[in-house]
Structure formats: structure tokens, C-alpha cells
Image (cartoon, rainbow, N blue to C red):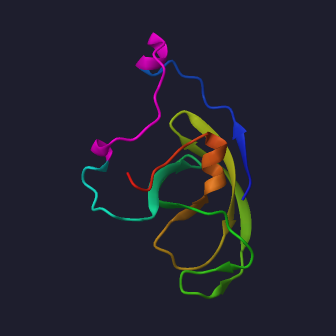
């Protein structure tokens, strides 16, 4: 998987905290766990704007390695590759997607290097 940054569209909708000069704090609290059944190690599944469309059931997982193996344990031969823009909030990155023809509960699977490019942090606990 390869990712690269591209400029997001300009917007005047800066968060109120950024306008007021209050530093943002990155963290999770016990309140963030409300509604989860603990302990768990569920997959991180999100909705992303990919290629201008809202795509549901996108799993965030490790980067792929070759050969590809399906969830059923069978070897999968990629059909090709396509580069699409992925938007989260105001950030847009270009991501190379590998195209496969196999059944999956997920519409797309994003590698964790994509999160690192965005500077994003996630918590499977929360």
C-alpha cells in the first residue's frame, strides 16, 4: 500500500478551539468506553469518503503482504490497482487500492500506514 498527501479543499470551517487558540488534547477517557462490552478486540470498521463516495464497512488493518489470502484461507490473485483519494474530515490522501474479486464482509480494507500518513491515532479499547 502506498499513500501520499494531497491538499484538502480550502474551508473557513476551522474548529472553534483552533480559532480561540486553545490547544487540542489527544486522549481517551472511561466515558469513551460507554456502550462497549469489555474486554474486546473488535476490528476497527469505519465509513470513509473514497473517490468522492461515502464507503461503509471499511476495515482498518495491517498493510497487505504478498501473496494475498482471503478470509476463507484461499490465495487471491489481484485483478489490478487503482489510486483514489480518501477524505477524513478536511484531510485528503491519495491511496493505492488493490482490486480483488472475492467475497468479503468489508467494502475495503485500509492499511495502518494510511493512518500514520494522516497523523491519526485510534484506540481499539474505545
Q: Identify whether 58 is placed above or below 106.
A: above
Residue 75 appears left or right of 108: right
Q: Identify whether 17 is placed above or below 2.
A: above
> Does the image show residue 56?
no
Judged from this view, the residue extending furthest toward the left is 35
Q: Quadrant of residue 31?
A: top left
Residue 102 appears left or right of 122: right
Q: Identify whether 70 is placed above or below 62.
A: below
Residue 8 appears left or right of 25: right
Q: Residue at x 62, y 77 (%)?
A: 101
Q: Residue at x 36, y 65 (%)?
A: 40
Q: Residue at x 68, y 52 (%)?
A: 95
Q: Identify whether 36 is placed above or below 74.
A: above
Q: Which residues are magenta?
A: 16-32
Provide residue 61's location: percent of width, then percent of height. 57, 62
> Where the N terminus falls, by quadrant?
bottom right
Provide residue 90's location: percent of width, then percent of height. 54, 33
Provide residue 54's location: percent of width, then percent of height. 47, 50
> Does the image show residue 36?
yes
Q: Quadrant of residue 102?
A: bottom right
Front-lying residue, 119 or 108: 119
Judged from this view, the residue extending furthest toward the top is 20
31 inside magenta stretch: yes
Provide residue 23's location: percent of width, then percent of height. 48, 20
59 inside magenta stretch: no
Front-lying residue, 79 or 42: 42
Amino acid at each position: 500500500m502506498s499513500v501520499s498527501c494531497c491538499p484538502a479543499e480550502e474551508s473557513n470551517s476551522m474548529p472553534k478551539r483552533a480559532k480561540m487558540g486553545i490547544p487540542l488534547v489527544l486522549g481517551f477517557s472511561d466515558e469513551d468506553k460507554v456502550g462497549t462490552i469489555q474486554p474486546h478486540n473488535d476490528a476497527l470498521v469505519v465509513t470513509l469518503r473514497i473517490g468522492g463516495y461515502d464507503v461503509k464497512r471499511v476495515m482498518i488493518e495491517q498493510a497487505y503482504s504478498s501473496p494475498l489470502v482471503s478470509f476463507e484461507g484461499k490465495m487471491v490473485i489481484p485483478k489490478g490497482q487503482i489510486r483514489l483519494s480518501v477524505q477524513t474530515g478536511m484531510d485528503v490522501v491519495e491511496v493505492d487500492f488493490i482490486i480483488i474479486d472475492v467475497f468479503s464482509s468489508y467494502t475495503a480494507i485500509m492499511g495502518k500506514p494510511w493512518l500514520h500518513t494522516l497523523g491519526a491515532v485510534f484506540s481499539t479499547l474505545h
